[in-house]
Image (cartoon, grey):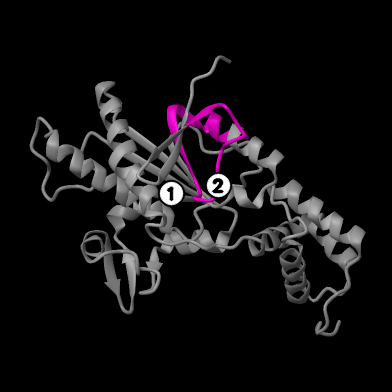
Amino acid sequence: MATLTLPVPLTEPELKLLQTLVYQECGMCFDEHRIHFLCDRLQRRLKACNIDSFYSYYRLLTSHEGKKELAALLENLTVNETSFFRNLPQLDLFSKVILENLLHRKQERRDFSLRLWSAGCSTGQEPYTMAIGVCDALAYYYLRNPLPFDMPSPKPLIPPPWKVEIVASDISYSALLQGEQGLYTDSQMEAVDYTCRLRYFEKQGEKYVVKQSLKNLVQFDFHNLKAEFLPQRNDIIFCRNVMIYFDEAEQKRLIEKFYRCLNPDGYLFVGHAESLFGLTTKFKMIHQNNGTAYQRLEVPA
C-alpha cells in the first residue's frame, strides 16, 4: 500500500461511530466545538498506520489485535498540558489549610498515613508539586509541633512515623514514562523557585531531575477514569482540567466515583474553570483567597 498523502474521507455516520467508541472507552465527549480536533487526530493515526479507509481502521480498533492502536488513538486525543505549581491560590489552600487540618486530625487519631491521587497526571509536574506540598506542610507542622524524639540525621523528607503515598495516573503511556523519569527542561521548571530546586531537584546537564527521595513518594500507573477499578482510600484527589473533556452525564458518574474513592471528609480539587455546582450534593465547597476545593460530605447510604 502506498504511503497516504491525502486525508481519508469521513462520512457523518462514520464520525458518529468514532465519537461513540471514544466515549465508551474513556468518557471523552467531542461535540461540534471539538469535532475538528477529533478528525485531525484520526487523520494522524490513519497516516501512521497507513490505512486508507475508516472502515478498515475501525475494524482494527475494535479487534483484539488493535488494543495497542486504540491506546495510541486515545493518547493522541489528550492534551498533556501541565506545569509545576499551576494555580497558586489553590495550591496555597492545599498546603497551608487543608493539609494542616488533615495532619492535625490524623495525628489526633494516631493515623500517620497520607494517600493522595493525581488523576490525569500527564507528565508528572502535578503529582511532584503535590509531593513537595506535603513535604513542606509536614516540615512546617513539626516546626510548631515538635516530635517527642530526635529526628534521624540527615532529616528525611517525610518524618517518622508518617507514611505518604501519591498515586499518579493517566491514560497516556508516554506521559507516564516522562513522569517516572522526572526529567524537566529549564522552560518546564520556570515556576520552580531556587530554594525549591535546591531541595527537590538535581541538575543533570541542561535539565533538572527530581531527587530520588521525592520520586519515591510518587507511584505512576495507568488508569482509565471510565473504569470502575480506581485507586481507593484517598485523603485527597486532584483531578484538574480533566472533566472539561466529558459531558454532564459522564462528569456526574466521575464525581460519584471520586466520592467512593475518598476517605470520609476527604478532599477533591478540580480545575479553575471546573465546578461541582449542579452535578452533586455530596461535596461542600471550600473557598479561601481565590483557592477552591471540595470536601466529601458524609451522607446516609
* Residue 291 or residue 115, whichever sits in front: 291
According to the picture, the residue beneath numbered tag 1 turns out to be 219
- Quadrant housing residue 266: top left
| Residue 266 among those drawn in magenta | yes
Q: Quadrant of residue 98?
A: top left
* Label 2 CA crowd tier, 10 Å (few <14, some 14–19, many 20+): some
**In this rendering, is residue 26 above or below 249?**
below
Mark whose residue sits in front, 2 or 1: 2
Q: Which quarter of the figure has residue 80?
A: bottom right
Q: Secondary structure under badge 2? A: loop
Does 228 sit above or below residue 168? above
Residue ranking furthest to the left: 150
Q: What type is the residue that disc 2 sits on?
A: Glu
Which residue position holds label 2?
274
Horizontal side, residue 172 vs residue 184: left or right: right
* Span shown in magenta: 257-284
Q: Describe residue 245's horizontal placement relative to residue 294 as left or right.
A: right
- The image shows residue 300, relative to residue 233, as above or below, that is above
Image coordinates of residue 46 in percent, x first then y, are 78, 72
Residue beneath the point at 42% across and 54% down: 126
Question: Which residue appears at 13% of the width and 36% of the height?
Answer: 144
Give the amino acid at mark 1: Gln
On the rendered structure, is 244 left or right of 184?
right
* Residue 260 drawn above or below residue 82: above
Of the pair 99 and 234, the residue shown nearer to us? 99
**What is the x, y in percent for residue 135?**
26, 47
Q: Earlier in the sequence, mark 2 or mark 1?
A: 1
**Residue 173 rendering spot, x and y as whole percentages:** 57, 59
Mark seen at residue 86: none
Most extreme residue toward the top is 300
